[in-house]
Image (cartoon, grey):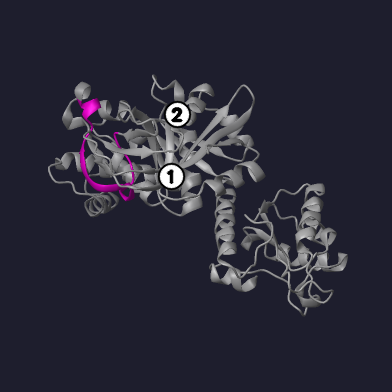
């Protein structure tokens, strides 16, 4: 087991043969020793693996977890028997012992994760896959614990869809720190054009995206907005942000914040438009699980007569990792009302093909719960002539998913990520967070 963890790049906190027989936890005294060890390393432990090389001592396992005080995910693994070695000397019985270990953990009030197969060899590639899923679960749970979100500006008046409950999120340990858009614009107005933080941000923008044809004043405004926003985020210690765009920034400042937001999402500081805080949480969960950038998209259009395909679109602030080609441009929709020169900064391009996981998180005020859905599909290479950031998605049995979204009143926004992490999302939400999540099959 230690070799398997080290192969996956994880450090081990484990009793040694100098502490207990073989370093195992088999008695009440062993449980106390294990708990004391875990307490000393509590800040380093993201998850616990209960490994059963044989039947195991189920009560000692549960006692060790209780006395440790740890509130982290637990994975229960049982090592398989060899049918050719079923004598008293060789038989493991971990097939049976896993049930007893889980029963005791349940009695003690612990939630836990399971390997895909009931028994799995820790030296196998299958267990490495189990371990990768569990590590993603641990990252989600650890990343949501004490999460602070920046909500900059009010949601657009027309977007009732992105309303949410701060109190329900707070009860789940997620805090929302608000800032009026006028305060951002006030800070921007007091920032000199040649300030070091501005010139640094201009250079970062040039290194991030092709800005050919974009007027320099638009780049300068984007840089000042980005510098001030990230400075405020550091000041109040928020990790991710949801920002008002439509259409106050364009009317009062003369730029769309898309490039700034794309750059933050690319650095795993997920950023959502239209102050969609719950959509942002979905982005963050996917980024935590995968270690790669997420985007927030609209379920936007049908794709001809193909019932399992649709167009996903935003206008757009997608991270550059989502594109096969991209450039900075102006926002064609808003330009019709506020003028082209006031809408530069959008990321325009075609989404590349690849496997994807999608997630929606929502707060249900009538039941006081957090709910959502998750599933997997793929972005395709199907042709699409449009503007903004857009791509065609293909999802098996998509009409059933669309019915579920509409029947349950979910938002038109969905978070997406180029990874296969729906197992970890379901494990985290069902086993540990207690959120009401649906998985589309």
Q: Nearer the viewer, residue 274 or 389?
A: 389
Q: Is residue 353 above or below residue 4?
A: above
Q: Nearer the viewer, residue 403 or 248?
A: 403
Determine if residue 176 is in view: yes
**Residue 269, horizontal then vertical, whole percent:** 42, 48
| Crowd tier of the residue under label 1, counting other residues whose Cα lies within 10 Å: few below 14, some 14–19, many 20 or above | some
Residue at the spot of label 1: 233
Which residue shows up at 12% across the image and 42% down it? 213
Q: Nearer the viewer, mark 2 or mark 1?
A: 2
Which residue shows up at 86% across the image and 67% down it? 27
Residue 131 is tagged as none
Query: Which quadrant, please, contains the N terminus?
Result: bottom right
Residue at the spot of label 2: 399
Q: Nearer the viewer, residue 412 or 309?
A: 309
**Residue 193, horizontal then vertical, whole percent:** 22, 45
**Residue 338, horizontal then vertical, whole percent:** 21, 24
| Crowd tier of the residue under label 2, counting other residues whose Cα lies within 10 Å: few below 14, some 14–19, many 20 or above | few
Determine if residue 238 is in view: no
Q: Is residue 158 left or right of residue 169?
A: left
Q: Which residues are magenta?
A: 315-335
Quadrant assignment, res 154: top left
């Amino acid at each position: 087991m230690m070799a398997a963890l080290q192969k996956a790049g994880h450090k081990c906190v484990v009793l040694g043969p100098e502490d207990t027989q073989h370093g195992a936890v088999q008695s009440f005294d062993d449980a106390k020793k294990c708990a004391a060890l875990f307490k000393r390393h509590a800040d380093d432990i993201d998850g616990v693996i209960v490994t059963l090389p044989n039947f195991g001592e189920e009560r000692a396992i549960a006692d060790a977890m209780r006395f440790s005080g740890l509130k982290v995910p637990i994975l229960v693994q049982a090592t398989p028997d060899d049918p050719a070695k079923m004598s008293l000397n060789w038989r493991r019985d971990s097939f049976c012992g896993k049930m007893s270990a889980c029963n005791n953990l349940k009695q003690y009030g612990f939630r836990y994760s399971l390997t895909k197969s009931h028994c799995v060899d820790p030296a196998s590639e299958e267990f490495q896959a189990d371990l990768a899923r569990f590590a993603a679960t641990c990252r989600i749970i650890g990343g949501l614990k004490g999460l602070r979100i920046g909500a900059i500006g009010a949601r657009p008046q027309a977007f009732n869809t992105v309303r949410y409950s701060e109190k329900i999120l707070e009860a789940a340990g997620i805090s929302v720190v608000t800032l009026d858009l006028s305060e951002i614009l006030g800070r921007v107005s007091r920032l000199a054009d040649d300030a070091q933080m501005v010139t640094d941000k201009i250079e970062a923008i040039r290194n991030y995206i092709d800005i050919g044809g974009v007027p320099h004043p638009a780049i300068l405004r984007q840089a000042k907005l980005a510098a001030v926003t990230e400075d405020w985020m550091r000041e109040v210690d928020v990790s991710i942000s949801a920002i008002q765009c439509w259409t106050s920034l364009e009317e009062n400042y003369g730029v769309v914040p898309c490039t700034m937001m794309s750059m933050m999402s690319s650095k795993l500081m997920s950023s959502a438009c239209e102050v969609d805080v719950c959509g942002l949480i979905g982005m963050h969960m996917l980024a935590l699980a995968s270690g790669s950038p997420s985007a927030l998209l609209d379920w936007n259009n049908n794709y001809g007569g193909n019932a399992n395909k649709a167009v996903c679109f935003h206008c757009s602030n997608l991270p550059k990792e989502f594109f096969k080609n991209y450039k900075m441009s102006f926002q064609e929709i808003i330009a019709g009302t506020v003028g082209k020169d006031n809408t530069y900064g959008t990321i325009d391009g075609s989404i590349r093909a690849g496997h994807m996981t999608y997630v929606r998180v929502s707060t249900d005020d009538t039941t006081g719960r957090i709910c959502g859905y998750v599933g997997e599909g793929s972005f395709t290479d199907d042709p699409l002539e449009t503007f903004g950031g857009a791509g065609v998605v293909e999802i098996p049995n998509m009409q059933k998913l669309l019915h579920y979204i509409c029947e349950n009143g979910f938002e038109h926004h969905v978070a997406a990520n180029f990874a296969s992490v729906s197992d970890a999302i379901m494990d985290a939400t069902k086993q540990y967070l207690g959120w009401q999540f649906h998985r589309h099959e």
